[in-house]
């Protein structure tokens, strides 16, 4: 009697198949890890842009409050209650802010805001109407950089007429 021995075929992966799968997985993970810095940078830029918009909105609202309280006609000497910005027009002093919108000194600030208020007529031209204002706010970061050299820049413009009641 002749016995023949045939090896049983077992299921599984060969060493070549496993090595190929590990190589593909490593390549995919490297691609994902390579995209992380881009995602983090985009996220940081979005946060800084949002903080800058919040600062500009706060400045414009502060000037609106000052305009509401100003009497008809002259606004000489009228300043905004929160930031002390003059309402009479022209370039206001540069203001510095942290990421929460708190006003700070230039040495510790994260954002730099320049404000231009332009009276557009109204009260002087037509006595029964309130003065119209155009406000331009430019927020740049970092605060230590000049506006033209800043890493980020956001500009917001607003025109408003204060409601003086009747």
Image (cartoon, rainbow, N blue to C red):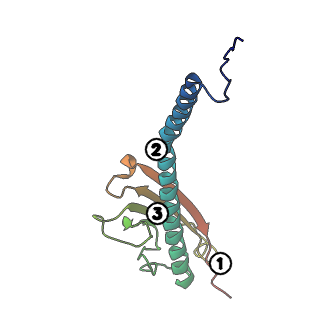
Res 112 quadrant in image:
bottom left
What element does badge 3 sit on? Answer: strand
Res 108 quadrant in image:
bottom left
Circle nearer the N terminus (2, 3): 2
Q: Is residue 39 above or below residue 24?
A: below
Q: Is residue 99 above or below residue 86?
A: above
CA gap, disc 2 to disc 3? 37 Å
Furthest residue toward bottom: 166
What element does badge 2 sit on? Answer: helix
Residue 118 drawn at (x, y percent)? 51, 65
Q: Is residue 91 left or right of residue 108?
A: right
| Residue nearer the viewer, 103 or 75 | 103
Mark closer to the observer (3, 1): 3
Furthest residue toward left: 107
Would residue 118 be visible to someone looking at this image?
no
CA gap, disc 1 to disc 2? 54 Å
CA gap, disc 3 to disc 1? 22 Å
Residue 129: numbered disc:
1
Name the residue rendered at 39%, 67% in the picture.
98
Quadrant of the drawing holding the C terminus: bottom right
């Amino acid at each position: 009697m002749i016995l023949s021995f045939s090896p049983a075929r077992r299921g599984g992966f060969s060493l070549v198949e496993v090595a190929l799968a590990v190589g593909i997985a490593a390549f995919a993970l490297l691609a994902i890890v390579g995209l992380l810095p881009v995602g983090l940078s985009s996220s940081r830029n979005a946060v800084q842009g949002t903080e800058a918009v919040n600062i500009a909105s706060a400045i414009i609202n502060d000037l609106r409050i000052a305009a509401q309280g100003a009497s008809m006609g002259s606004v000489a000497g009228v300043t905004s209650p929160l930031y002390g910005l003059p309402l009479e027009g022209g370039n206001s002093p540069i203001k510095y802010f942290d990421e929460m919108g708190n006003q700070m000194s230039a040495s510790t600030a994260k954002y730099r805001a320049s404000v231009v208020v332009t009276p557009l007529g109204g009260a002087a031209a037509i006595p029964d109407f309130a003065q119209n204002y155009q406000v331009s706010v430019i927020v740049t970061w970092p605060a230590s950089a000049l506006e033209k050299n800043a890493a980020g820049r956001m500009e917001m413009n607003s025109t408003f007429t204060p409601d003086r009641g009747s």
